[in-house]
Amino acid sequence: MVAQVYSYRRFSSPQQKFGGSIERQNDYANLIAEEYGLTLNEKLVMTDEGLSAFHAEHVSRGALGIFIKAVEEGLVERGSILIVESLDRLSRDQPMDAMHQFNELIGKGITIITANDSQVYNTASIAKDPSKLFISIAIMIRAHDESLTKQKRSVAFVKQQVRKFELEGKGDVAGTTPFWLSRTKKGFILNEHADIARDIVTSYLSNKGLNTISRELYEKGVPSPQKGKPRWGITTIRNVLDNKALYGVKHFKLRYLVDGQQVVEEYNLSDYYPALITEDDYKVIQTKKKKKATSREAYGDVTYLLSGYGKGRSVCSKCGQAVGSQLQKQRNRKGEYTQSVMRLHCMKHKESADCCKSFKSARLEEAFVDSVSHKIDGRFLTSFADNAHQESVLKAKIEDVEETISNLVETLMVVREPDTKAQLQKSIVSAEEEKRELQNQLTAIATSVISEEEALKINELKKAALDIRNNDERKLLKQIMIEVIDKIVINFEKQSLVVHFRNQDTVSVVHIPVIDIYVFVDEQVKAGRQR
């Protein structure tokens, strides 16, 4: 590989994009390549649009970061030239950090040439004229100070708008607007896309997974808010569900430097937007998302009910490692397809062959579904029924209070000032009382009896889900079980399992090989049943 000329352009605002700097720099890069007898590398013409050099985003997220990594890994040859408009395009970070980056590039044999003043920076030029080093530091200090001044103005404006909103209920903090809202002269209003966001929320609260929601939106012909993308991405749907604007809150973090240290201030402005849902619904959504973290709704057109619950939630009893399912197609001697067989694998054994062999798991899955179905509240199928929804809200609130208590206790352990300690202890007692009250309300709802209609719906879902071809029903059952099951421990040698529920109940599904049947025991009610 030979030395080449590389061109780097960065602009942090659209106005800079339409100036003449890019064309000027392109012409200059070609001129430098000709002068030094090198080839202009047109495959890595680096442009960072909308990335700030003051926050070093162009290094952490942009093309310059890729170039620096390529230099570090030796993919860019020593003696190569990097063209930049000026040194302040290279970095507006804190001078010490900017200088470190500058020295690192030069130390790797890279020559930096600035297009605005034709200055050449490399080991030889700086050794010949050390004043170049002082000039470069001065440019970086000036660039950082200019950006710091702009930042102070921006931060002051945002804080002024926050105060105005808190005092008058008016104020535009700026920032991006969610797709279901529009900005008008009188404030924000729900627009024609509000029903899309509402449908996403309703589907999720009805125990539909993100993949299912994405597919249904595509089938309805609802385009993604991301231009040019007809299908909704999982991340896009997740971002909708995460957005506090759903219940009217403007949430943002204000980051700025004070004496070289980054300060982060978090804001939650209530009633900033018109609400699409209640705060209680939002909390339920976040609780559901935590429970489903790392779980897998389906694999293609197949939903597995004994695996895919997330990290550490469906494991081998012998090694404690993950369990995986496989639908294996079987063929006869003529190579003709005969049937599909579901098998369960210990993933450790599958990789290293030193644990438990796989086995056909269809009958165990059937016994598992039968054994846990009586633990599923039929109101899950009508998530907005009063009791079921209120139960979800209370659980979400309890989790919030528990997190608050944990944070208060952590703070109490490091605080020394007596008055602050006393206030923290008072807050902990208050939070504990709130938690007890919420738990009492939850107990009252949980002990209520479900209707015959709800029990029938669960039974119908169970029967449909036992047929692997009914993927929609299996997905729905899987989403419900993700919420109620904490862990499944599978004994491969005995082809049995133990289910641990989030409410501390335990169900064992045991295979009796002598008579080839499965029985299950509910360790809460101590009752057995044969299958």
Image (tube, helix red, strand yellow):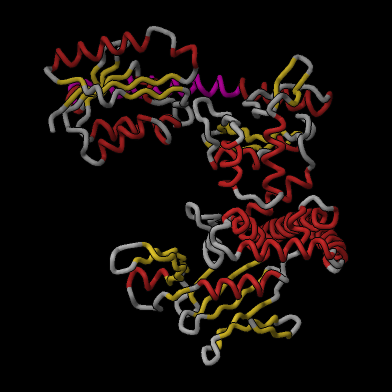
Residue 437: quarter of image: bottom right
Residue 20: quarter of image: top left
Magenta residues, dominant SS class: helix
- The magenta region covers 127-152
The residue furthest bottom is 514
Q: What's the residue at 54%, 41% (across, down)? A: 235
What x and y, as percent, mark residue 308? 52, 61
Relative side of 377 to 494, left or right = right
Counting labels gives 0
Is 314 above or below relative to 300? below
Q: What's the residue at 31%, 12% (across, down)? A: 25
Q: What's the residue at 28%, 65% (across, down)? A: 334
Assign the N terminus to one quadrant of the image: top left
- Residue 524 can be seen, yes or no: yes
Assign the C terminus to one quadrant of the image: bottom right
- Residue 416 can be seen, yes or no: no
Q: Is residue 449 magenta?
A: no
Is 503 above or below relative to 120? below
What x and y, as percent, mark residue 15? 49, 11
Is 190 above or below relative to 331? above
Relative side of 263 to 77, left or right = right
Q: What's the residue at 73%, 51% (across, down)? A: 284
Which is more toward the observer, 81 or 362?
Answer: 362
What x and y, as percent, mark residue 11? 43, 19
Is 59 above or below relative to 373? above
